[in-house]
Image (tube, rainbow, N blue to C red):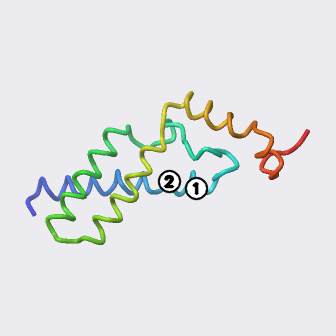
Amino acid sequence: MEKNEEINYVLVEKVCHAFGKTIEEVGTDGVLKYPMLLYPESLLPYPKPVIRYAFDLWKKYAEEKGNREQLDMLKFVEAHLDSFIADDEAMKENLKLASQEAFLEIGFRKKS
């Protein structure tokens, strides 16, 4: 690996790991805060195109190394990126479900 490729790989790894940490954090809030499992883009550690580009590069590295297991894992994690949408849309969609009676009956929200 050349010097520039090493630097790229370090940056790619940093971006992808930061995104993984974000997924972990929103997963902790889970259905209570985001019942539609749609998250505000503002929670992302980097802009969506940067994260997607980082995943593309890492998948390329994994493919070149013949690491099928890592490639599959990267594709799985990257798929979560589509769950991050414009903040106002995420709020609107999550509130839509959160206000439904069936959701309230399950006890995910406090009743007044």
Three-letter amino acid code at disc 1?
Answer: Gly
Q: Count all numbered tags in the image, as a single digit.
A: 2
Q: Which mark is residue 23?
A: 2
Rendered-image quadrant of the C terminus? top right
Rendered-image quadrant of the N terminus? bottom left
What residue is rendered at 26% in x and 45% in y?
53
Whole-angstrom CA distance, mark 1 to mark 2, is 6 Å
Q: Image height check: is 6 above or below 42?
A: below
The 10 Å Cα crowd at callout 2, few under 14, some 14 to 19, many 20 or more, is: some
Q: Nearer the viewer, residue 72 or 62?
A: 72
Residue 78 location, x and y as percent?
37, 53
Q: Nearer the viewer, residue 30 or 13?
A: 30
Residue 42 location, x and y as percent?
50, 36
Furthest residue toward right: 112
Q: Image height check: is 4 above or below 68?
A: above
Asked whether the beta carbons under mark 1 and mark 2 sit within 8 Å of each other, the answer is yes
Three-letter amino acid code at disc 2?
Answer: Ile
What residue is rendered at 55% in x and 30% in y?
89
What residue is rendered at 51% in x and 41% in y?
43
**Callout 2: helix, strand or loop?**
helix
Furthest residue toward top: 88
What residue is rendered at 35% in x and 65% in y?
73
Residue 34 location, x and y as percent?
63, 44
**Callout 1: helix, strand or loop?**
helix
Q: Which mark is residue 27?
A: 1
Residue 111 location, x and y as percent?
88, 42
The 10 Å Cα crowd at callout 1, few under 14, some 14 to 19, many 20 or more, is: few
